[in-house]
Amino acid sequence: MSGVGLVVVLTGIWAFRPRARSVESALVTRGDIRIEVVDEGRTRMHDVYVIAAPAAGRVLRIEVEPGDTVKENDRLASMVQGVAAPLDVRRAAESRAAVDAAVARHRAAVAAADLATREAQRIRLLADAKLVAEVARDAADARARTAMASVDAAAAELAQARSTLLVDAATRATHQSTLAIRAPAAGQVLRVWQESESVVSAGAPLLTIGDPRTIEIQADFRSEDAVRMRPDMSAVIEAWGGAPLPARVARIEPAAYTKVSALGIEEQRTKVLLTLLHPPPAALRAHDFRLDARVTLAARHDVLKVPQAALFRSDDKWRAFRIENGRARSITVTIGIGDGDEREVLQGLALGDRVVLYPRPDLLEGARVR
């Protein structure tokens, strides 16, 4: 073969040989891997008291303001029970009218009994003289006894009406007494529900106080994340306006509720309570302040790790393309935990190996890559 022919053959071989494919790659490294979930939470004072009106009446103007510190048994407000109303005047008039009616019925019963008694005496005299029959005397005696019983019944009704009038008068007098509403425990005023003087019903909320020394965090996690949590798992409180604060999981509530996300998707949420490992800063000693709670579900330190983008499934196994001498070699990889970006490598890869990122389906074993 002439020299020109050899050059042509070599040129053809070079022109039609497989070209190296351009791929993204990364190194297998060592480091830490954490599996974390983060969601919105709120501060909560563990001991919160809603102070309500003990009875119906007029509450006087409340002088304390939100943020004021109070001690146990401090006077928070005053109220006057049972403010006079048209209903009270009507009841008093009805009670007096009932007494007057009972008095009248008693007088009528006494007069009827007196008449029946005298009539019975006359009939008895006539019966003794054999001028009337014995039946007439017995009937007259019966009417006299019935009339006396009516007197007793009227006297009882009169006593009942008078007692009702006395009770109403005592109740009105008692309702005009002043009650002092005191703090059940030391704490801080969180909210004043009724600032101005007004008439309130029994049980109406007046103030809310809480103890700022007992701050805990309530976060709402998806139920699929909550089932992976355990008490005493480490957590971090962040996005509250200051430096991250270490915390731990205290309790996972067993009941979930439905919440619609900003995208309109229904999610099952579970309340998770967390406690701070150190006393909270003064700015965070508050109730219902927003923050983010980050809980660590699992952690590995100083482990071999590979980018998640380098892994793919084949024959129900995790595999990756390792670059060896400019060629892609498919290998089986045993992996551990991952955080979504990186996965722990248990077998198959070594420190410093270079792997192909985002391998395409048409990338074949032994393909030239660069």
Image (cartoon, rainbow, N blue to C red):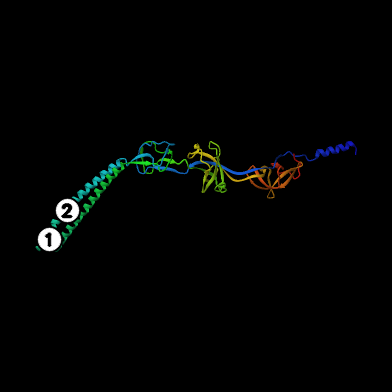
Name the spot of residue 140 as percent of width and height, x first.
15, 59
Q: Are marks 1 and 2 in contact (CB under 8 Å)?
A: no
- Tell me, for residue 112, which label it has, or none: 2
Name the spot of residue 23 as percent of width and height, x first.
72, 39
Name the spot of residue 105 as percent of width and height, x first.
20, 50
Element class at badge 1: helix
Q: Splitting the image into 4 quarters, where does residue 27 fall?
A: top right
**Is residue 137 something that shows in the picture?**
yes
Q: Splitting the image into 4 quarters, where does residue 139 fall?
A: bottom left
Residue at mark 1 to residue at mark 2: CA–CA distance: 18 Å
The three-letter code of the residue at mark 1 reads: Arg
The answer to whether residue 182 is left or right of residue 91 is right
The three-letter code of the residue at mark 2 reads: Ala
Name the spot of residue 62 as percent of width and height, x first.
38, 37
335 and 269: which one is in front?
335
- Tell me, for residue 124, which label it has, or none: 1
* Mark 1, other Cα within 10 Å: few <14 / some 14–19 / many ≥20: many
